Amino acid sequence: MGNGIVNPLSAVIFLLIFDCVYTESALTTESIHFLKPGDVIENNKPGLQTFCHSAKPKYMKHMWESLTMYLRTKIENYDLYNGKTPEEVLQKHDDNHRSWNFNIFSIQKNKKFKINPFEDVCIGIYVHPSNLHKYTVSMVETSTDNSALILMVAGAVLFWNAYKFSKNTLFYYLISIMLGITASIIILVYFISKFLLKGKMMYITVLTGWTMSFYLLQMLWENTQLIIVQYREWVAWYILITSFISFVIAYRFGPITNVRTKRLIQWFLQIIGLITMYYSSYLREATAFFCLSILLLYNYPTVLTQKGRTYCDRTRRKNESFPGSRRARKERIIYSLKY
């Protein structure tokens, strides 16, 4: 009786200790690599390898910097995980491999990853033992990210000219065409999902708690670029036809004339501009400062201009109140240069 109770308890305790020891060993082996800009690491081992980057200090000079991690491999069957620490990456990997859940924690299988330079970032690469294991991971630093600068400028221009855009007829037609294309794509995806999830697929979707739907959407999103490349003629015709239909509908109803509607469009465009500015750089404190500055300049231009002129006039009068000291300072400089 006593042995019957002790043995299961001992087995459970042994399994818990073994699990903890295994986890610690997985975190302290050579499977964790800390990358710096310019580093290139070649791996030929199966299993999970974690590549991390430590956060940089938040200085204004680093505002437009960006980091990119590249994965170069011919392997097709691999999983990717992201997190802030190696423990988080390992936890996501273990959660995916403990049950049949379609790797919902796995990220999109890109081979190029934009990394936030001001945060601790880890990316785990799991290669199945049955595959070839060789791949290379490198990190490249860009001192000035042109795309981030373009986003900042575009957001500022959109915010500042939102009032003009809300009244512009050409802008109205362009937005109508873009909304028409987007709406048609959403409707098309909806009908495709309704077609795919009929019969047995519907029961599987219900039993898996919509995990199957998430998996299918993930597959479609990952293959979007492949679809555009392979069926670019069909995609071009689809965009052309939906654009023409959207233009006809917009032309039929005509531009917006209601003042309040135009004001709502203006506010919407300004919000989009501020969001674009805020997310143009990973240094959120600096982008938030720029958003606040443009808000103040737009809403209180006269007050800020007057305060700037007052400050300049005060500084000028202060300098002019000491003409003798300035003249003496100039004479000392001329004297030192001569002798």
Image: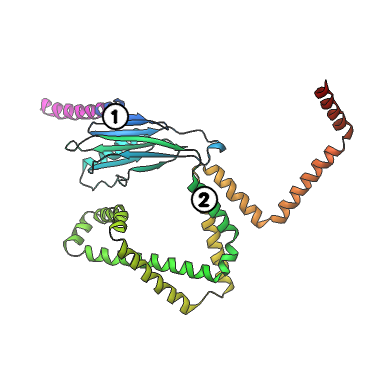
State yes or no: residue 61 in magenta.
no
**On-image quarter of the N terminus:** top left
Chain part drawn in magenta: 1-21
State yes or no: residue 19 in magenta.
yes
Up the image or down, 104 lies above or below 250; here it is above
Up the image or down, 73 lies above or below 308; here it is above
Left/right of residue 162 with respect to residue 94 in the rendered view: right
Q: Residues within 10 Å of mark 2 (few under 14, many from 20)?
A: few
Of 321 and 29, the residue lying toward us:
321
User: Residue 229, percent across and down?
Assistant: 31, 56
Residue matched to label 2: 150
Secondary structure type for disc 1: loop
The main secondary structure of the magenta stretch is helix
Of 195 and 203, the residue lying toward us:
195
Q: Residue furthest top?
A: 339
**On-image quarter of the C terminus:** top right
Q: Quadrant of residue 167?
A: bottom right
| For discs 1 and 2, the disc positioned in front in the rendered view | 2
Of 233 and 144, the residue lying toward us:
233
Secondary structure type for disc 2: helix
User: Residue 121, percent across and down?
Assistant: 40, 37
Residue matched to label 1: 31
User: Residue 194, percent across and down?
Assistant: 25, 65
Q: Residues within 10 Å of mark 1 (few under 14, many from 20)?
A: some
Up the image or down, 24 lies above or below 130; here it is above
Residue at the location (11% across, 25% down)?
3
How many labels sit on residues? 2
Residue at the location (84% across, 41% down)?
317
Left/right of residue 132 with respect to residue 120 in the rendered view: left
The amino acid type, in three-letter code, at marker 2 is Ile
Residue at the location (44% across, 40% down)?
116
CB atoms of marks 1 and 2 within 8 Å:
no
